[in-house]
Image (tube, rainbow, N blue to C red):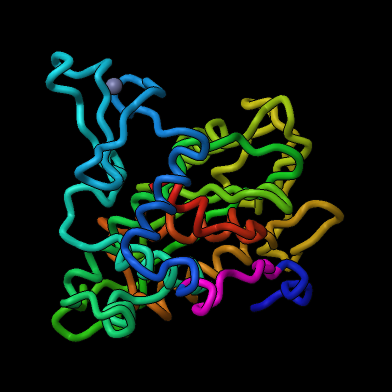
Amino acid sequence: MRKSNQANHEPKFTRQLTIADFDRLFPNEDACKAYLRDQRWPKVVICPRCGNDKVYASKARPFHWQCTKCGKNPRAPYRFSVTVNTIFENTNYRLLIWFKVLYLMLTSKKGISALQIHRMVGTGSYRTAWFMCHRLRAGLADPEFRQLMGVVEIDETHMGGKDANRHWDKKRHIRGTGDKIPVIGAISRKGNVVCQMIEHADMPTLHRFVNRVVDKDKVELVATDEHAGYQYLARWQKLPHDTVNHREGEYVRGLVHTNTMESFWSLLKRGVVGTYHNVSKKYLPLYLAEFTFRFNNRHEHDIFGKAIAGC
Ligand SMILES: [Zn+2]
């Protein structure tokens, strides 16, 4: 059942680059390389191996540099290109194709399927589009995660479609929620979301997650539902914890509710079920990274640049 005030919690996304903007920014491969260089090294190109900021641009090969400091000897400098240590390194695809795929991924609020990307970008084969999408998702995973503060909602959900919706040979013939994958998430109101696939939604797992993602000194309230796994958060973890009792029809009591987290779940589910038609355990973390990145950067005007800088 949708809660009456759900609409107020629907995330708002900032307008992104239009296709015309994109084409103006990236008319060709060199423009992409220059953009990647400027996102990675905004001031001066730095050697990725030793941190030296006095590298020499290669005259013969544009967007390649040489570092004499960490080379074997002055005659054999270390050579690197603009894609070194990025997810674009050692692939045969042009940056312009990578950029288009990333652009489509970031501008589609509920995600975009590899098939659709293949049709729109002309990636050669569906398999290529699929590979590029997954590699980009891995690039979007946040390495610099910051603990949540203020009012934090914690909630868990289950991903994975109903067996009845599967093609007959993919059916697992399991009843109930047995084939669903539990996912736990935390969201700071008006702030960032963190989520993670878990094996079981039991108390040790939930407590461990809360400990990892919540800043104990700066959290004002941890709001959850009445799930037994959240018991003793106050007593054992010394957290300001309060619950709403969904089973008894209570969804909001003052500041205590999990509606923000639930609106993220609904966005994630509409995306994963509607766009990707289900995901397996193996790939779910990649989709979580994609949806988390898009959500956490929903007010970022240059989400594309930020993604490129982190790839
Ligand atoms: Zn070097």
Residue extending furthest toward the right: 254
Q: What segment carries the magenta color?
A: 10-22
Task: Give coordinates of residue 110: x percent, y percent.
Answer: 49, 73
Left or right, 297 with respect to 132, comes to: right
140 is higher (above) or lower (below) than 122: above
Please report the residue visible at 70 percent of the width from the left and 42 percent of the height from the top: 222
Q: Residue at the spot x=18%, y=55% of the render?
A: 91
Q: Quadrant of ligand 1?
A: top left
Residue 218: image quadrant is top right
User: Is 96 in front, or is 182?
Assistant: 96
Residue 110 appears in the figure: no
Q: Is residue 10 visible?
A: yes
Q: Is residue 197 left or right of residue 73?
A: right
Vertical relation: 138 (above or below) 18: above
| x and y, in percent, of residue 206 in the image | 51, 41
In the depicted view, which residue is nearer to us: 310 or 187? Answer: 310
Q: How many marks?
A: 0
- 116 is higher (above) or lower (below) than 203: below
Residue 167 in the figure: left or right of residue 270: left
Residue at 42% over, 47% down: 141
Magenta-colored segment: predominant secondary structure: loop
Q: Position of residue 225 (x, y in %)?
A: 65, 53
The front one of 268 and 171 is: 268
Quadrant housing the N terminus: bottom right
Snapshot quadrant of residue 49: top left
Q: Is residue 18 magenta?
A: yes
The quadrant in which residue 4 appears is bottom right
Query: What residue is drawn where x is 64% and y is 71%?
Result: 15
Residue 174, magenta (yes or no): no
